[in-house]
Amino acid sequence: LPYFRLLVPFVRMGEFMTGADPFPLDVGVLRETAREGFIPMLKTFGEALACGILGWAVALPVMAAAVYFACLPLLRRFKVRR
């Protein structure tokens, strides 16, 4: 799925920010653990998930500001006058 492409960079960013050891993100282990249920998956990948959420939370405002300021001239150009 295309929206999982940024999962690893966000996890790595969170690990860097917290000083955590790099978590081995293996798709096979993820699939196998997912078949066992949500709780075992959370126990196995909980720290990586928390690091990913932290990385996303820090990167999101920066990315949103970049998109906003990049689109601002275009939005001003097409502004509807009242």
Image (cartoon, rainbow, N blue to C red):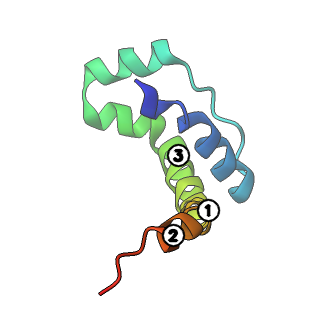
* Residue 70 relative to residue 78: left or right: right
- The local crowd at label 1, few if under 14, some if 14 to 19, many if 20 or more residues have their Cα within 10 Å, is few
* 71 or 5: nearer the viewer: 71
Residue 39 against residue 13 in the figure, above or below: above
Residue 26 percent location from the top left of the image: 55, 19
* Kind of residue sitting beneath label 2: Arg
* Closer mark to the observer between disc 1 and disc 3: 1
In the rendered view of the protein, which quadrant contains the N terminus?
A: top left
Q: Secondary structure at mark 3?
A: helix
Residue farthest along the front direction in this orientation: 81
Q: Secondary structure at mark 1?
A: helix
Label 2 and label 3: CA atoms lie apart by 45 Å
Are dots 1 and 3 in contact, CB under 8 Å? no
Residue 31 percent location from the top left of the image: 38, 17
* 58 or 38: nearer the viewer: 58
Residue 43 against residue 17 in the figure, above or below: above
Label 1 and label 2: CA atoms lie apart by 13 Å
Residue with the mark numbered 2: 77
Q: Which mark is residue 35?
A: none
* Residue 6 relative to residue 42: left or right: right
Residue under the point 51% across and 70% down: 77
- The local crowd at label 3, few if under 14, some if 14 to 19, many if 20 or more residues have their Cα within 10 Å, is some
- The local crowd at label 2, few if under 14, some if 14 to 19, many if 20 or more residues have their Cα within 10 Å, is few
* 52 or 73: nearer the viewer: 73
Residue with the mark numbered 3: 47
Residue under the point 44% across and 68% down: 78
Residue with the mark numbered 1: 70
Residue 55 percent location from the top left of the image: 59, 54
* Kind of residue sitting beneath label 1: Ala
* Kind of residue sitting beneath label 3: Glu
Give the mark nearest the N terminus, 1 or 2.
Answer: 1
